[in-house]
């Protein structure tokens, strides 16, 4: 049976998750490289090489700028579609997605996971039921035989710096300056919360948000670079410690899944291993196909 106080706490969480929240995105404005100044004729070979390199860099920068512009246009389109989504349909898809995750063997077998705290104003797939299920019986001192260890995001600044901190109760969450729920940096006893980057055991699973996805694993975020930066750093940590890479699973409404090739990608974009939509699980990477065994 669910603990008596959990229903009250879950209601508080759902109320908080449905309050208006703001999200500040950053727009990359790279510096354009200028042409080198003229030199004496005896440096003509060096000048030609420098000019060629500068031209190549300018072409690459123009290409990146074009990709960033495409991403911004696509974000505007998807945001509009999400805003116009029927509330009843949204609720149905929220319930279907969370039920699929909760009933899946790959979720049930996970011992340590990172999951986002959904914000209704950002029109993210709801995660309140997932969090409630995990926090009914959280692991104590990373004893995963007694439950799951959960890490949730805390944004530290506007420079794509985000940490994943351990929580064991709904009460560990507070609203930040943008009214988005996140963990306090210290617990009730004043102790620093466990940071997943400093944990002694690897995470099995990431449950990720996003604005749009495709069936090849491309993910379009909101432009801040928080998740891509964090995921790259965590994957490097896992590789250095010779751990198994976690499954990266994105939760997506039906309308957020776009045709392959529509989402522009850059070298900094981290692909996902699988999608969960109301229609079911879409495994993408070989690792997902193996571990999800669908």
Image (cartoon, grey):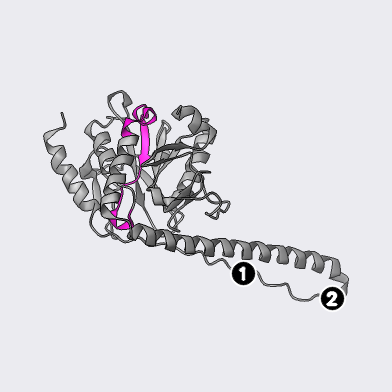
Q: Which residues are magenta?
A: 102-123
Q: Is residue 66 left or right of residue 100?
A: right
Residue plotted at (46% across, 49% down): 213
Residue at the spot of label 1: 32
Q: Nearer the viewer, residue 246 or 241?
A: 246
Q: Position of residue 16 (x, y in %)?
A: 21, 52
Residue plotted at (30% across, 53% down): 119
Q: Is residue 175 above or below residue 127?
A: below
Residue plotted at (46% across, 27% down): 293
Q: Is residue 166 left or right of residue 210?
A: left
Q: Is residue 72 left or right of residue 167?
A: right
Q: Is residue 73 above or below residue 236?
A: below
Give the numbered dot on residue 175. none
- The quadrant of the image that shows the C terminus is top left
Residue plotted at (80% across, 75% down): 39
Q: Nearer the viewer, residue 49 or 281?
A: 281
Q: For the residue labelled by badge 1, is the local secondary structure a helix, a strand or a loop? A: loop
Residue at the spot of label 2: 40
């Amino acid at each position: 049976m669910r603990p008596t106080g959990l229903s009250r706490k879950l209601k508080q969480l759902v109320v908080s998750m449905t309050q208006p929240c703001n999200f500040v995105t950053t727009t990359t404005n790279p510096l354009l490289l200028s042409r080198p100044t003229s030199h004496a004729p005896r440096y003509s070979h060096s000048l030609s090489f420098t000019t060629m390199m500068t031209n190549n860099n300018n072409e690459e920068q123009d290409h990146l700028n074009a990709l960033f512009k495409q991403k911004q246009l696509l974000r505007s389109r998807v945001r509009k579609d999400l805003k116009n989504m029927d509330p009843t349909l949204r609720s149905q898809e929220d319930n279907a997605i969370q039920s699929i995750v909760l009933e899946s063997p790959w979720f049930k077998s996970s011992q340590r996971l990172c999951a986002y705290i959904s914000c209704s104003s950002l029109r993210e797939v709801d995660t309140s039921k997932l969090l409630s299920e995990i926090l009914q019986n959280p692991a104590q001192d990373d004893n995963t035989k007694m439950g799951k260890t959960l890490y949730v995001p805390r944004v530290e600044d506007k420079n794509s710096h985000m940490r994943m901190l351990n929580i064991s109760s709904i009460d560990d969450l507070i609203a930040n300056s943008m009214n988005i729920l996140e963990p306090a940096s210290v617990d009730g006893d004043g102790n620093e919360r466990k940071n997943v980057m400093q944990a002694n055991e690897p995470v099995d699973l990431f449950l990720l948000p996003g604005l749009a996805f495709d069936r090849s694993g491309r993910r379009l975020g909101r432009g801040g670079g928080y998740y891509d930066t964090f995921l790259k750093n965590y994957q490097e940590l896992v590789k250095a410690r010779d751990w198994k890479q976690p499954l990266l699973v994105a939760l997506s409404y039906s309308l957020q899944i776009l045709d392959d090739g529509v989402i522009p990608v850059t070298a900094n974009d981290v692909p996902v291993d699988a999608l969960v939509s109301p229609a079911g699980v879409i495994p993408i990477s070989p690792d997902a196909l193996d571990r999800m065994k669908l």
